[in-house]
Image (cartoon, coloured by chain):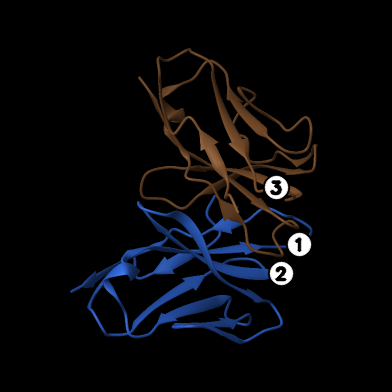
Chain colours: A blue, B brown
Amino acid sequence: SQQGEEDPQALSIQEGENATMNCSYKTSINNLQWYRQNSGRGLVHLILIRSNEREKHSGRLRVTLDTSKKSSSLLITASRAADTASYFCATDAGGNEKLTFGTGTRLTIIP
Amino acid sequence: GAGVSQSPRYKVAKRGQDVALRCDPISGHVSLFWYQQALGQGPEFLTYFQNEAQLDKSGLPSDRFFAERPEGSVSTLKIQRTQQEDSAVYLCASSLEGSRVPQYFGPGTRLLVL
């Protein structure tokens, strides 16, 4: 079963604009990760945020985590055509090592 | 260094056939995971190894699915008596230490059961 849901399911923006996608999850977590998947490079890790962190940055990526609302957001600034992909959040919880993925947001950057 | 590799990349099987999918993790990675991804969905956890020990197989959908990692490196996911609902992409991932660190995914094996 999918732990999380990404919102929106699909998003199209012009190149250079910012893209924001959200993830909601159901149970308390240890960590939340964001992954990108496209046909060329498969599933690639982007950023990991721990449950005691509220915000994290990596290059053009900014992730926030609100454990009280069980939600996270991923912001991609100054989008590029190469950012076109599906984005998934994934969580691990309790003593389990498995990652539970959300349903994904399909992002299209229009040149 | 080399990433996670999987073989075959594509597999067509007739219903009822047995298939074996191979995963070569990144050298030195203790943890190895198998996921199943249906079209348009996120990956779903199947099983997890720490070295050669299979610590979690709660995601395996039936007893037709079996995974092993006998020497703590290469892993094989075997599906016996394949069914059409087994058609999916099977992803393997490895990490240095469970899910508290990033997982590195292979390109996947796309399985089509006819």
Quadrant the C terminus of chain B occupies: top left
Left or right side of B97 for A53? left
The chain carrying label 3 is B
- In the figure, residue A67 lies in which quadrant? bottom right
Chain letter for mark 1, please: A
Name the residue: 42% across, 42% down. Answer: B38
| Residue annotated with mark 1 | A94
Taking depth in this image into account, of B85 and B34 the one nearest to the observer is: B34
Q: Element under label 2?
A: loop
State which chain disc 2 sits on: A
Pointer 3: what residue?
B27
Residue B63, relative to residue A105: is it above or below? above
Callout 2–callout 3 Cβ contact below 8 Å? no
According to the picture, the residue beneath numbered tag 2 turns out to be: A30
Q: Name the amino acid type tagged 1.
A: Gly
Residue type beneath disc 3: Ser
Report the residue that reaches farthest toward the left.
A111
Pinpoint residue A52: horizontal percent, then vertical percent: 71, 82
Report the label total: 3
Residue A104 x %, y %: 41, 61
Q: Is residue B86 left or right of residue B72?
A: left
As helix, strand or loop, the secondary structure at mark 1 comes to loop
In the depicted view, which residue is nearer to us: B71 or A9? B71
Q: Is residue A4 above or below residue B44?
A: below
Give the residue drawn at x 63%, y 35%.
Answer: B60
